[in-house]
Amino acid sequence: MKKYKIGILGAGSIARAMAWTAGQMENTVAYAVASRSMDKARAFAENHNVERAYGSYEEMLDDPEVDLVYIATPHSHHYEHARMCIERGKPVLCEKAFTANLRQAEALLRLAHERKVFITEAIWTRYMPFTKTINAMVNDGTIGTPMTLTAHLSYPITHKERIRRPELAGGALLDIGLYNINFALMAFGTDISEISSAVIKSDEGMDFQDSITFKYADGKMAALQCNVFCAGDRQGIVCGDKGYFIVDNINNPQRTDIYSADHKLVRTVSCPPQITGYEYEVQACIDALEHGRLECEDMPHSETLRVMGLLDSLRMEWGVRYPMDDAEV
C-alpha cells in the first residue's frame, strides 16, 4: 500500500493537528513542513515527527516526494499559496475558508482545471461519516417532516490577529460562520429563496457577531448565529412535526440526541471513534487521486463556489471588506 507523503504549508496549531493525523493514518505520513521561518519549521518537524523542514514554501513545493499539500495558513493567503501549488502540479487540500472571496476561488479553480491539478476545500465536517448520519436523519422520518434548523457557534477569540485584521480576512464569518452555513446547506439543501441577516462589527470593521436566516422555497427556515466574543453551546438543532434532534457540536459532531414531540429522549447516536476528524478529508483526497479525479465528491468545486458566493454577499451587505477584494487575481 502506497504511503502518501503529506506536505504541510504553514506551522500553526491546525498544522499540528494535521501532522498528528497524518502520522496516525495507515496510508499517510507527515513528510514535510514549510514555514517562512526555518527555525519554526525545524522546531515543528522535531516536535511532530515530520521528516523534512523547509524555510520557504517554494522549496517544499519543489520537493518531488510531496504527494499532497495541506495549506494551513490564514485564509487571506490561501489563494496565493494554492496557486503556487497548482503551478507546480501539487495536489491541494486547502483549509477553509477556501479563499478570501469568490473571485479568488473562481480564478483558482479555473487554473486547477486548466492544469488538471486536484484541489479541494478542507471544510472537515463535509467529509465526516457522522455528518452523513446526521443528514440522513433529516430525511428518513426520524423527526417527521423537518421545518426548522438552528445552529450556534462562538468562541472568545477577539484577541487573535486572524480575527481582528482586515488584511488577514478577519471576522467571524470566514473563520467560524461558514460551519453554520455548511450545516444548514448539508441538512436543508440549497434551494434558498431569501436571506436576512444582522451584524455587529469591530472598530476595524470586521464582523464579530453575525445572525443569518435562510428562508427556503418549501417553507423551511434555518437560523444561524456565530460570534467571536464568547463561548457558546455549539449546538445544531433540527425540528420536525414528530420530534427534534440536537447535535452537540456542529464544528465536530460527536453525539446526537433524538427527542419525541413531547420532549422525551428517544435515543442517542454517537460518533464512531476517530483520530482527530481530519483523517476523513485526507482519505477523501487520496481516494480522488487514486481515481484520477480533480475534486472530492463530498465537497465539489461547485459547492465551494456556492459557499464563497454566500460569504461575499453577506459581507457586501454588512460593509465588511478586505484589501484583497480590490486586488487583481
Image (cartoon, rainbow, N blue to C red):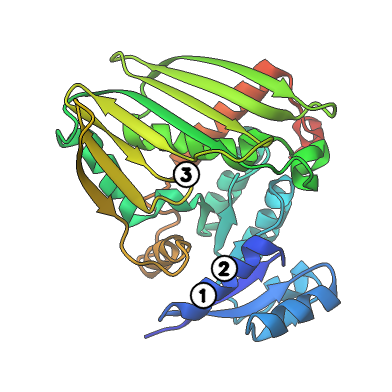
Q: Residue at x 73, y 19 (%)?
A: 319
Of label 1 and label 3, which has the lower sequence position? 1
Q: Residue at x 16, y 37 (%)?
A: 140
Q: CA distance from mark 1 to mark 3?
A: 24 Å
Q: Amino acid at mark 3?
A: His
Q: CA distance from mark 1 to mark 2?
A: 6 Å
Q: Residue at x 65, y 27 (%)?
A: 209
Q: Find residue 32 and report its image quarter.
A: bottom right
Q: Position of residue 33 (x, y in %)?
A: 69, 74
| Residue under label 3 | 301
Q: Quadrant of the C terminus?
A: top right
Residue contact at pointers 1 and 2, CB within 8 angstroms: yes
Q: Amino acid at mark 1?
A: Ala
- State the count of labels: 3
Residue situated in front as seen by the camera: 240 or 119: 240
Q: Quadrant of the N terminus?
A: bottom left
Position of residue 74 in the picture relative to residue 111 (left or right): right
| Residue under label 1 | 22
**In the rendered image, the vertical position of residue 177 relative to residue 39, given as above or below:** above
Q: Find residue 39 and report its image quarter.
A: bottom right
Q: Amino acid at mark 2?
A: Met
Residue situated in front as seen by the camera: 38 or 271: 271
Estimate how packed mark 2 is, as few (under 14), some (14 to 19) or many (20 or more) residues with alpha carbons within 10 Å. Answer: many
Q: Secondary structure at mark 1?
A: helix
| Residue under label 2 | 18
Q: CA distance from mark 3 to mark 2?
A: 22 Å
Estimate how packed mark 3 is, as few (under 14), some (14 to 19) or many (20 or more) residues with alpha carbons within 10 Å. Answer: some
